[in-house]
């Protein structure tokens, strides 16, 4: 087994999909969890595989004896992410209660928001398309919040 080595820079990441630790020395993670990576071990061995984490740039604010970590993303992307998490919870409740028509409608809204979020994060849109997309995203969130 390869030895653990300290990372040379501070590395924070967001979990991309659920991971259930199968061993005594593995950590279970859920989508959206924020992790602080202090040591690495060959990318495979360790408390969780590196493939389940997307590294993010963060701001660290020190408050007395605590550190507050905030992901460095534009506010609209954060809003979309929060909305998707909220709607995801609602979607699960609708699914469990077997409300198929509503499940499909909420699912469609979520897929649109996920696609637009990807476009916002890409950083490749011209400014006029970016402004238009921001307007579409905020309108869709407002519509979805009234609907859901």
Image: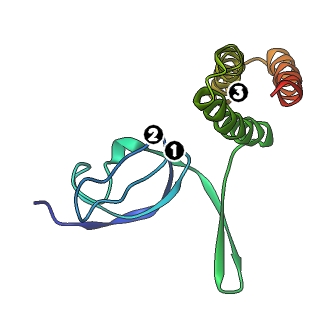
Residue pictured at 80% horizontal, 28% vertical:
148
Residue 54 pos. (x, y %): 47, 43
Q: Position of residue 44 (x, y in %)?
A: 23, 49
Image side of residue 107 versus residue 16, left or right: right
Report the residue marked by disc 1: 31
Q: Position of residue 61 (x, y in %)?
A: 70, 70
Mark seen at residue 17: 2
Q: Are marks 1 and 3 in contact (CB under 8 Å)?
A: no
Give the SS element for disc 1.
Answer: loop
Which circle's residue, 1 or 3, is located before the other in the chain?
1
Q: On the image, which quarter does residue 105 sit in?
A: top right
Q: Which mark is residue 120?
A: 3
Q: Earlier in the sequence, mark 1 or mark 2?
A: 2
Residue 107 lies in quadrant: top right
Q: Secondary structure at mark 2?
A: loop
Q: Where is residue 33 shown, x and y percent of the image?
A: 53, 53
Q: CA distance from mark 3 to mark 2?
A: 21 Å
Residue at the (65%, 30%) spot, across then down: 91
């Amino acid at each position: 087994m390869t030895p653990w080595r300290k990372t040379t820079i501070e590395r924070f990441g967001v979990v991309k999909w659920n991971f259930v630790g199968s061993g005594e020395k593995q950590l279970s993670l859920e989508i959206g969890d924020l992790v602080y990576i202090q040591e690495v071990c060959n990318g495979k061995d360790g408390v969780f595989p590196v493939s389940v984490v997307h590294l993010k740039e963060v701001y660290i604010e020190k408050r007395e004896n605590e550190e507050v970590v905030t992901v460095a993303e534009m506010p609209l992307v954060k809003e979309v992410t929060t909305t998707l998490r909220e709607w995801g919870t609602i979607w699960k409740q609708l699914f469990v209660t077997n409300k198929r028509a509503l499940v499909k409608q909420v699912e469609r809204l979520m897929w649109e928001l996920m696609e637009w979020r990807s476009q916002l994060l890409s950083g490749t849109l011209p400014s006029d398309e970016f402004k238009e997309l921001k307007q579409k995203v905020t309108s869709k969130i407002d519509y979805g919040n009234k609907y859901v």
